[in-house]
Amino acid sequence: MLVIGERINGMFKEVRRAIEAQDKAAVQRLAREELEAGANVLDVNLGPAQVEPLPALRWLVEAIREVTKAPLAIDTTKADLMEEGLRLAGPGSFLNSSTGQEEKLRLFLPLAAKYDASLIALTIDEKGVPADSSGRTEIGLRIVAAASEAGLDPGRLYIDPVILPVRFTQPNPGHVLGALREVRLLCDPPPKTVLGLSNVSQGSSLRELINRTFLVMALGAGLDAAIVDPLDRPLMEAMITAELLLNRHIYCDDFLKAYRAGAG
Ligand code: THG
């Protein structure tokens, strides 16, 4: 599974503080920790920090780029921020995210091409997040068609069926699993799929248990990538074990160690 580290997000108090105080070392430490823990890509989101967003995003991306060449997922809904983030992050980045709305796709598909980026697109339209799995699938198929028309390599399109907190929307996780299966079944070649995993446990106690249980279920439904906290060690171990059981890695008694050593 492609692991996208969620921690560089102004939603976390320590990151928000680091952005506001321009504390480069704090951001760089987080980037290193996420990568060492197994992240392949780093999500970068300013969150609700009280700063001018464009210079703040520039500062953030440049600070990360001083310590790693790892791909970054620029996590914003604003086109001007997205373009500047992709430009500074360089080729191989992720655009996080478009929706299925036509005007968003018209804006973001060309940006993905211009900056040689993968595109994450949420199954959201003018009416918001659909109430069931087939509504998500329908928007997903529309996104796949638009991306194909724009010439995006299907291996670089990630459909995100939008996981919401189970505490407030209990049927939602089941609908997300349905949409993951349906989108893959109905497209040839299938697009990749991604989730912002930690959404599922927002407002709940036992957050980590909910996160790792749902991650395993989503892997069973074919999930390719997830935005997760790679510093959550039991989560990463559950992911590695699920992939082993799904025959995505070769079994050996020391499979956790082997995976971490890069032999997975
Ligand atoms: N899909 C895509 N991108 C996304 C999401 C998604 N990006 C943002 C988000 N959802 C994924 N990232 C997070 C990061 C943090 C949390 C949840 C999702 C989180 N934060 C604590 C909270 O809200 O309780 C912050 C509290 C704190 O510790 O200070 O849970 O779905 N494509």
Image (tube, rainbow, N blue to C red):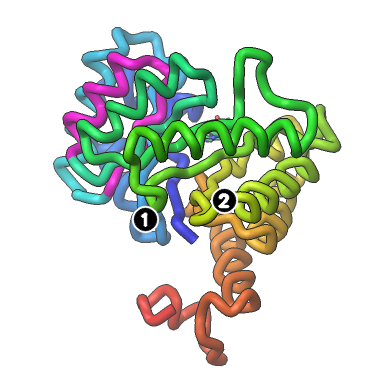
* Percent position of residue 131, x then y: 78, 27
Q: Residue at x 14, y 42 (%)?
A: 66
Disc 1 to disc 2, C-alpha distance: 26 Å
Q: Residue at x 81, y 28 (%)?
A: 168
Residue type at mark 1 is Asn
* Percent position of residue 181, x then y: 68, 53
**For the C terminus, which image quadrant?**
bottom left
Query: Given the current orientation, which residue lies at the most extreme bottom position?
Result: 253
Q: Earlier in the sequence, mark 1 or mark 2?
A: 1
**Mark 1: few, some, or many residues within 10 Å (few <14, many ≥20)?**
some
* Percent position of residue 34, x then y: 39, 51
- Magenta segment includes 82: yes
- Frontmost residue, 79 versus 139: 139
Residue 113's disc is none
| Ligand 1 positioned in quadrant | top right
In the shown orientation, is residue 241 left or right of residue 131? Answer: left
Q: Residue 30: in sight, yes or no?
A: no
Q: List the residue tagged with mark 1.
A: 40
Q: Residue at x 33, y 16 (%)?
A: 79
* Percent position of residue 185, x then y: 65, 55
Q: Residue at x 35, y 19 (%)?
A: 107
Residue type at mark 2 is Cys
Query: Given the current orientation, which residue lies at the most extreme right position?
Result: 171
In the shown orientation, is residue 243 left or right of residue 42? Answer: right
Residue 187's disc is 2
- Frontmost residue, 152 versus 211: 152
Q: Which residues are magenta?
A: 71-90
- Magenta segment includes 218: no
**Mark 2: few, some, or many residues within 10 Å (few <14, many ≥20)?**
few
